[in-house]
Amino acid sequence: MHICDQIVLVTGGARGLGLAITESLISEGARVVVNYHTSKQQADMLANKYPKQVFAYQADVTNKEQVQSLFMAAKEHFGSAITSIVNNALVNFKFNGDLRPKSEDLSAEIMTQQFDGAVLAALNTTQAALNDMKQANFGRIVNIGTNLVQNPVVPYHDYTVAKSALLAFTRTSAQDLGQYGINVNMLSGGLLQTTDASQSTPSFVFDLIASSTPLQRVITPAEFASAIMMFLSPYSRAITGQNLIVDGGLVKG
């Protein structure tokens, strides 16, 4: 199925990387369900600007009932079910370097918050989509990860551990759901220049990453979003259970 024929849910789709993903999908002709939690103004602006392509809906992706309501509302709005999911939402996290809790400061609450935002959220959206995807014998699920799993150069314990678990869930889901025509993959980025989450990162860190990267620059949200289009397109129909690192070649996965 071509992207222009898909209805794609983008969690956290109204700002930062999510906004770049939404804009890429709009340019490809897709219909987009823009999920947001607190970014109502930005989401409404998208829906007003692209009324035929964008449906904005507020939901906490860690809440199963709210996610199920989102899927039902999107199906009613577009007259067809969501075909594809980009699990992008980032729950209460900033890439703020030394201000992140170190090993001695970690708690179960801190770890669980990021686990829920990554793995539980992906579980909720996947389960809400399954019946319709199985009936269509088609589905595309793209989870957003991090190159810190392969190269943990900064101690973002909660975030990195949660994304590592999401990578495992990506692979087990791909194995389980391939029989129904559902492809599940991950794209993992590094620091992006610039998103709401990365604006707390000191400028020298961006310079250091750029100098260490074969492309000699920090990847932008738009560039990362472009790579997601590949996993949604027919060109990737034989690809599932994979993790593509999109960071300009900094980490070799």
Image (spheres, rainbow, N blue to C red):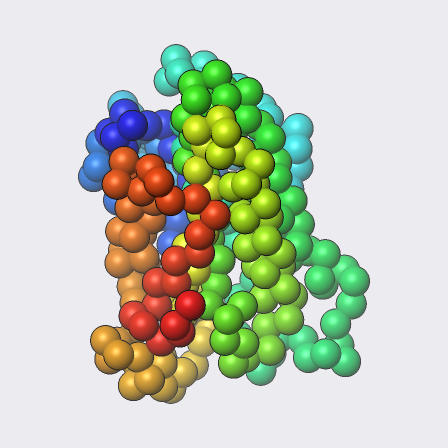
Q: Is residue 98 left or right of residue 200?
A: right
In this view, 238 is above or below 115: above
Q: Is residue 89 left or right of residue 191?
A: right
Q: Does residue 97 appear in this view?
A: no
Q: Is residue 188 left or right of residue 235?
A: right
- In the image, what residue occupies the spot 72% across and 63% down? 110
- In the image, what residue occupies the spot 55% across and 41% down? 175
Residue 247, position as x, y percentages in the image: 34, 68
Q: Quadrant of the C terminus?
A: bottom left
In this view, 135 is above or below 64: above
Residue in front for this viewpoint, 83 or 63? 83
Residue 163 is drawn in which quadrant? bottom right
Counting labels gives 0
Residue 76 is drawn in which quadrant? top left
Q: Quadrant of the N terminus?
A: top left
Residue 159, position as x, y percentages in the image: 59, 64
- In the image, what residue occupies the spot 36% across and 76% down? 250
- In the image, what residue occupies the spot 61% across and 36% down? 124
Residue 139, position as x, y percentages in the image: 43, 30
Residue in front for this viewpoint, 137 or 161? 137
Residue 241, position as x, y percentages in the image: 48, 48
Q: Does residue 160 appear in this view?
A: yes
Residue 82 is drawn in which quadrant? top left
